[in-house]
Image (cartoon, rainbow, N blue to C red):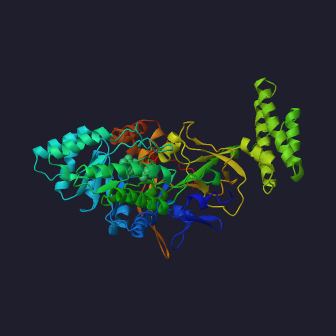
């Protein structure tokens, strides 16, 4: 896995050129050069790089594929799409989405009151807005207000009670009535970690009995003309196309039945999201088994077949794909700030006049290690380390012996791995797995990859430099939260190898890919680490520029967000210092100034230069 599987997960958005990861677009800047440019202004900590051209690429691909499938099969309905806001509500993401989709009439999907207000604010009048999720009467009323503004809005009901609210409001007010959608409860479920949105046990949707009741109510209240859409969503990151086809057959037949029952306004099927992207770095872990072309062909063909058989006009098709549109645009760059074994340096050895035999032996192993004995010596030294710790526990070795022993063992391992770096040996690989070097990264897994924490979702990760040298350390990653869950370990069958770097003399960054969907607002402020510094990278033929740099919150703002009064904090801390005894007044004012600068910096570590 010399290329870290970049050809598997990056969809050709990123490639390796010489020793660096570069963005495969126009002037092809390296991620390292982008990182350096942001850090040149003094910003430290993790970065979220946004690539708007990737959002554009995904939106184009969605529309172009559906348009082609429609043409190929001579399908009679239109293709329409909305972006589900819950996948990423950040302003700079929406800005790119809206700018990239002008020609497509792309709209937004909202699942809460705040998202609905956002959708009403941002969606161009005429482009669709869909509203899903549980709603109260106020939220439904907001849908009427949106319709009154001229928005093409569809309120999708999740239960009969929501339909009753619509009927109440329609009877009481003279506001324009929004389009009505009905979420259908399919017996075909989804698969995978995110599959709770489909199936009979699903949280959402009307059963067939409720559907019949809804049609009756709509007719009785003269709202049947407003009933325009049926909707389903089988869950995110759908692994196999057959899951979708099954759901489409069920939903298609429901659509046809509802048409035949006199739903005169009904003209659309909303197939939700679920379009998957690839997160794997190893061929053995690949999960996506279809591409966008197969996806669009399957949707068009399946629906056409059902409608033609039942002699029903082809419906317009809506999708609400979110992950597919934004996951790849976001890259998290995390500085490595420490290698665990860096503490064990040869210069810290303090040899005694007389050492215990086991320590003496380690000295000999360390000084006589060479190619043909490296594996054996490494093996022996690991065994010796276990003995040393036992002897220490029993009181036979003192702290200096233990320190010397630990340093020597780490030195032997380091030297052996370097000497053996071109060897391919299963025994060496097994040893490596026991010896995962811990790389401490300046970021929080809870904040930036909550799906790893909660669902063990893997995000592809690799260094952004040194890719022309062979990485020799099998790695585990630690984040800077003081929580033992803030660790990413790698399965022996799919290890992550990183470089042995001397961080006193060089910088080393890891990039995590496909973090643009869900992670940002799902992220939590564990230990009060907040959203990383973000920035949009606009790449042209002769370079790149950085737009909308938003630095991670300052320490005072983090505390203020929790409800603390930041002025009071500042006053209190300053007054404590000014009432303490300093030798000189100058030192006092310098210290106060230092503290103030500190409080206005972001909350991540600043140890790398
Ligand atoms: C979450 C959600 C989506 C988006 O799903 P993706 O898998 O991200 O495409 C679409 N529609 C509904 C109703 C959702 O709840």
Quarter-wise, where is residue 10 in the image?
A: bottom right
Nearer the observer, 204 or 553: 204
Give how far across and how far down residue 485 sits, in percent.
Answer: 55, 37
Residue 43 visible here: no
Q: In the image, is 3 to the left or to the right of 594?
A: right
Residue pictured at 17% horizontal, 43% vertical? 167
Residue pictured at 83% horizontal, 41% vertical? 379
Nearer the observer, 232 or 473: 232
Residue 328 visible here: yes
Q: In the image, is 477 to the left or to the right of 163?
A: right
Nearer the observer, 209 or 278: 209
Give how far across and how far down residue 36 sits, in percent.
Answer: 54, 62
On screen, 468 above or below 567? below
Q: In the image, is 401 to the left or to the right of 315?
A: right
Residue pictured at 19% horizontal, 50% vertical? 224
**Quarter of the image where the N terminus is located:** bottom right
Give how far across and how far down residue 257 sits, in percent.
Answer: 30, 49
């Amino acid at each position: 896995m010399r290329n870290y599987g970049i050809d598997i997960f990056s969809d050709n958005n990123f490639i390796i050129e010489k020793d660096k990861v570069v963005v495969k677009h126009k002037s092809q800047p390296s991620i390292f050069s982008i990182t350096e440019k942001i850090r040149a202004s003094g910003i430290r900590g993790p970065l979220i790089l946004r690539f708007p051209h990737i959002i554009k690429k995904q939106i184009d691909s969605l529309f172009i594929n559906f348009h082609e499938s429609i043409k190929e099969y001579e399908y009679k309905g239109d293709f329409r799409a909305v972006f589900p806001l819950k996948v990423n509500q950040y302003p700079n993401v929406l800005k790119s989405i809206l700018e990239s989709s002008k020609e497509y009439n792309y709209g937004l999907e909202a699942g809460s009151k705040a998202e609905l207000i956002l959708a009403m604010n941002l969606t161009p009048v005429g482009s669709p807005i869909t509203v899903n999720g549980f709603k109260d009467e106020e939220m439904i009323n907001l849908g009427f207000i949106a319709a009154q503004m001229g928005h093409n809005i569809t309120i999708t009901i999740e239960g009969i009670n929501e339909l009753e609210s619509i009927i109440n409001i329609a009877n009481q007010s003279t506001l324009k009535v929004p389009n009505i959608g009905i979420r259908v409860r399919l017996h075909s479920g989804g698969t995978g970690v995110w599959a709770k949105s489909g199936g009979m046990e699903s949280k959402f949707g009307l059963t067939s009995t409720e559907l019949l009741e809804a049609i009756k109510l709509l007719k009785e209240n003269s709202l049947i003309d407003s009933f325009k859409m049926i909707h389903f969503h089988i869950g995110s990151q759908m692994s196999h196309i057959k899951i979708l086809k099954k759901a489409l057959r069920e939903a298609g037949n429901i659509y046809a039945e509802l048409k035949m029952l006199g739903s005169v306004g009904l003209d659309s099927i909303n197939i939700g999201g679920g379009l998957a992207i690839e997160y794997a770095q190893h061929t053995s872990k690949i999960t996506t088994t279809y591409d966008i072309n197969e996806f669009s062909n399957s949707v068009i063909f399946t629906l056409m077949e059902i409608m033609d058989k039942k002699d029903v006009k082809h419906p317009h098709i809506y999708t609400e794909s979110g992950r597919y549109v934004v996951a790849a645009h976001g890259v998290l760059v995390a500085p490595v700030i420490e290698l665990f074994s860096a503490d064990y340096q040869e210069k810290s050895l303090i040899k005694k006049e007389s050492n215990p035999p086991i320590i003496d032996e380690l000295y000999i192993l360390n000084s006589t290690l060479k190619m043909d004995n490296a594996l054996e010596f490494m093996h022996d030294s690991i065994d010796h380390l276990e003995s040393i710790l036992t002897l220490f526990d029993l009181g036979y070795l003192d702290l200096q012996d233990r320190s010397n022993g630990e340093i020597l063992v780490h030195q032997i391992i380091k030297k052996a791995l370097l000497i053996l770096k071109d060897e391919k040996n299963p025994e060496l690989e097994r040893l490596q797995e026991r010896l995962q070097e811990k790389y401490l990264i300046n970021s929080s897994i809870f904040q930036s990859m909550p799906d790893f924490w909660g669902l063990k979702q893997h995000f592809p990760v690799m260094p952004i430099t040194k890719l022309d040298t062979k990485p020799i350390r099998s790695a585990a990653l630690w984040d800077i939260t003081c929580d033992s869950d803030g660790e990413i370990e790698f399965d022996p069958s799919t290890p992550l190898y990183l470089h042995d770097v001397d961080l006193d003399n060089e910088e080393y960054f890891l990039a995590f890919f496909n973090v643009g969907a869900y992670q940002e607002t799902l992220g939590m402020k564990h230990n009060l680490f907040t959203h990383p510094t973000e920035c949009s990278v606009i790449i042209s033929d002769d370079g790149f520029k950085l737009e909308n740099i938003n630095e991670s919150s300052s320490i005072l703002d983090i505390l203020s967000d929790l409800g603390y009064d930041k002025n009071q904090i500042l006053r209190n801390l300053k007054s404590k210092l000014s009432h303490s005894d300093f030798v000189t007044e100058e030192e006092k004012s310098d210290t106060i100034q230092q503290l103030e600068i500190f409080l206005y910096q972001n909350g991540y570590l600043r140890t790398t230069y």
